Structures are given as structure tokens and as C-alpha cells.
Image (cartoon, grey):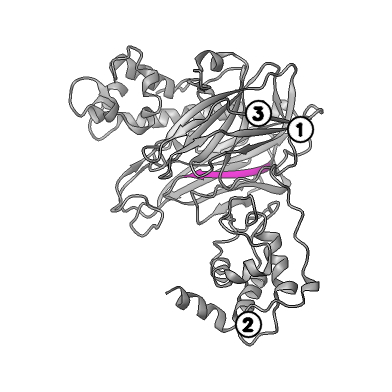
Amino acid sequence: MKRLLIIPLLATAANAAPVEFTTHIAPIIFRNCAVCHRVGEAAPFTLTSYDDVKKRAKLIAKVTHDRVMPPWHADKSDFAFLDDRRLTPQQIDLIQQWVAQGTPEGDRAKQPALPKFPQGWQLGKPDMIVKMTHAYSVPAEGRDIYRNFIVPLNLNEDIYVKAVEFRPSSPSVVHHSLFFWDTTGAARRSANASGITRFTPMQRENKGTGQLGGWALGATVRLLPEDLAFLVPKGADLILATHFHPSGKAEEETSTIGLYLTKEPPKRAFTGIQLPPAFGALAGVDIPAGEKEFTVTDSFVLTSDAEAFGISGHAHYLGKKLSMTALFPDGSKKNLVSINDWDFAWQEQYTFDKKIPLPKGTRLDARVTWDNSATNPHNPTNPPKRIRWGPQSEDEMGSLTLLVTAPDKSNIEEINRAQVQHVRDAGSAAIARLLQDRNGGGTLVSVFFKNNDKNGNGKIEREEAPRWLVASFDQHDTNKDGALDEKEIQAAQAKLFQGLRVP
């Protein structure tokens, strides 16, 4: 069957002008493929020589024709991205012709040298290298695991971080990791001897914590623009909030982190605008079985002038299309990013070639679409079943995050205040939906128990808890009886909607 798929693609190229590896194909493969397909990197085989490429020539012709490789899922937008790995139609056609002509090598003297790829650390040796204090054991099978790890930095002074490079020791089981710093001491106080902490910085509004970005498979580490940097205060600890996905083989993970520093304080502040917020947790993600195009939209109007410099998306297996546009005050509309074939296993972070001015009043519109049909080859359930929002890989999430900066810190502060209100409004809408649940109205707690207390004992056992609650179940089980009563559920819901204005 593969032969039948490939040969028709090549037939029209059989009589074309001569195409040789050294002159035509090597420059394409070395620039666009060898960065991953080389010794020591994640790709399963190397493409750094004629013999390497010839051995897999028909496969390369197929996956480049289908634009599966090189991995780059953003379609062409109205703004260029840095290091765009997409092949041009002309390059794809050259590969087709070369395979049709029998993969001739050509004059070896004309073959270009391989690029000088960095060995190990992608940005060169970091200024500071730290690692997890203990290995974490990931079982071969079971549910996804979320754990927070404390990594002491032992800082005697403030530092300015331009980039964070994350290197998992067992990348097959590490789905993603988010980075935070903490000066409150809360992470240390709640950490056990293995460095695992109950501290959850993403749920706190505290001046003693901050974000440092994150990593997922497919992310390309790069330095922040020259006028930006993360401030990490003296005495801060690094927190890794890591998501593990068992792979079928037990693994031991000891992540290593490289920090790239600058002595120059940042001249500008920056922030991320996530739509819908909280990775879609408040957006009513409830996807019926068989639904091919379940869509959530969200909008946000900039309350200050800003400039966009990067964008990324996030979804799970059912994610299909993600897009964000900008509607400018003059009425013009521009596409910031369109991902029409989402890949859960390759989550790129896109950096614009030039900063994009976004005047005050610009409306950002985000759209996320999931495919829960049997025809979706990535659907983890067969037959499809109803899927709701949740932290497990088999649950769903969905959002886009636009990174923006501004000349004045006050502009970013104003945008952040507007974002807080936006999250509150989303929380209010989420609560209203919950109160209108078809199983009956009532208080949040009564609706929750009606939907989840399957055995009717007035408590929520671990096996009855929805997936969003499982990861923090022990934390909310304050009386340690192995179940959550009404007061404990109230506290859990209050934490989920902390700071939100309810109707």
C-alpha cells in the first residue's frame, strides 16, 4: 500500500532535469532535517549523509509531500515566524524528482558541509546548571501524573534570565514542564525528602512567586528579545510543575535545567495573554462522542498599546484547529497564527520575525476546535466517548497564548488587570453554566454531589472524583479519611475559582 501511495507522486518527475543529492537535496536536508535527525537528538535516525538519506528516500518523499515533516504545524499567517522549517513547494518537488530519478549522489566535492550544530545545550553552555535533587519513578502504566519539584538555586543576588533550557533524562515520559520561582519559602516547607512539593504556584496570587515559561516536546528554546528578561529574586527556589505520561516502560526522571543570564536589567516588561484562560477550564469544554467540530471561542480587547513577539497553542489528542486573529481599531483584520492540523506530540512555540504593533483597542479573537469522531486518527477512545476538560491526556484542554511587551511597565500592568477581570468574567460564566446543569439547579456543592456522588453516601470517594480534582485530592482531604465531604468540596471549589466574581 505504501508503494501505491508513493509511486504516483514520483511519476510526473521521472523525466525532469537531473537532480542530485550533493547539489540539490543535501542543502534541504541538512538545513531543515538534520537539526533533529543527528546523533544525540530526539529523532529515531540520522540524516547527516548521503547513505542516511538514500536509505529512507521514499519515506522522506512521502512525509515531505504530506508536510508531516519537517514538523511545523502553523500555516502561513500575515506575519512571518523566525526559523520557519516549512519546505517550499519547489523544495518538495526537488525531493520528488530526486527519488523518481533513482536517488543519484552527484559529485561529492559539491556536497555542502553540515551546519555547526550545538552539542548538548542548544544555546551553548548555560550560565547556571541545576537539576532535580532526586530521580522520580514513573510507572510503566497508569494515569497521567502531575508533580511539582523544588530545585534550590541558592541565589545570593537577583538574576536576570534570558532563557531556560529544560533537558529531561527520560523524554518519552515527560509531556511538559512549567517553570516558576518562589521566594515565600512555601515550596520548601511543603517539600518531602525527595524534593516533591505540594506547592502549586500557578494557583497562587502572591508577590513572592513568578513564572519562567515552560517546555513541551517540539518547543525550541530561544533567548528572549534583547530588551526583555525574567527577574528571579535573591533567595528564590525553582519549581518544576511536570506532567508525566506513562509510556509502557518504567522510567526514572531526573530533569536538568540550564539558565542563560544577562547582567542587564530588562528595559521592558512583558506578559502572556491566554485565550480562553486557564487552558479552557472555564470555557465549557464538554465534547459529545462523535462530534467532529466542537468549537470554543474567546475574545480580549487590549486596554493599552502593546507589541506581540510570540505565540503558542495547547490542546490534547482531540485538538484539531487553533487560531488567533487581531482586529485592529481601524477595522483591518490580521491572522496571527493558524494551526489546522494540531499535533499533541509536537507543541511548537512560534516567535515572530518582527514585533507586531497592537494599538490600544485591538481585539484578539481565539478559536479552538476539537474532533471527537471515529475518523480522527488521534482519538484515544474507540468508539469515541464524551470528553470534558481535565488534566489527563485523555481529557481535553485548549487555548492560545500571545506574548506581548510594551515600552512602559504600566502598559503591561494595565493589560494584566484587564486579564484578571477577563478570568473573573469567564469564571462567572462557568458557574452560571454549572448552575443550569440539566440534572438540576441548586448550589454549586449540591450540583457537584448530584453529578458525582454515585454511591449516595454523601461523600466523594477518590474513584468518584472528576479528573480535575484527582490530582489534588489528598490536598483537599483535610481530615484524611480518604473521601471529601461537603466542607472539603466547598474549599476545593473555592480554590478553583479563587478570586473570581460570582453572579
Is residue 303 a member of the stretch shown in magenta?
no
Q: For the residues marked 2 and 3, what is the alpha-carbon distance in whole angstroms?
A: 51 Å
- Residue 298 seen in the figure: yes
The answer to whether residue 282 of the structure is visible from this angle is: no
Which residue is label 1 attached to?
407
Say which label, 1 or 3, has the lower sequence index: 3
Q: Which mark sits nearer the N-terminus, 1 or 2? A: 2
Q: Between marks 1 and 3, how big is the CA–CA gap?
A: 33 Å
Nearest to viewer (mark 1 / mark 3)? 3
Is 378 or 127 nearer to us in this picture?
127
Residue hosting label 2: 101
Q: Is residue 185 above or below residue 140?
A: above
Please tell me how crowded label 1 is: few (under 14), some (14-19), or many (20+) other residues with Cα within 10 Å.
some
Residue occupying image coordinates x 67% and y 58%: 34
Of the 4 image quadrants, the one containing the C terminus is top left
Q: On the rendered structure, is 446 left or right of 247?
A: left
Label 3 belongs to which residue? 130
Name which residue lies at 51% across and 18% down.
193
Task: Tell me the amino acid under the disc marked 3.
Answer: Val
Name the residue type under label 2: Gln
Indicate whether 46 appears above or below 468.
below
The span picked out in magenta is 309-315
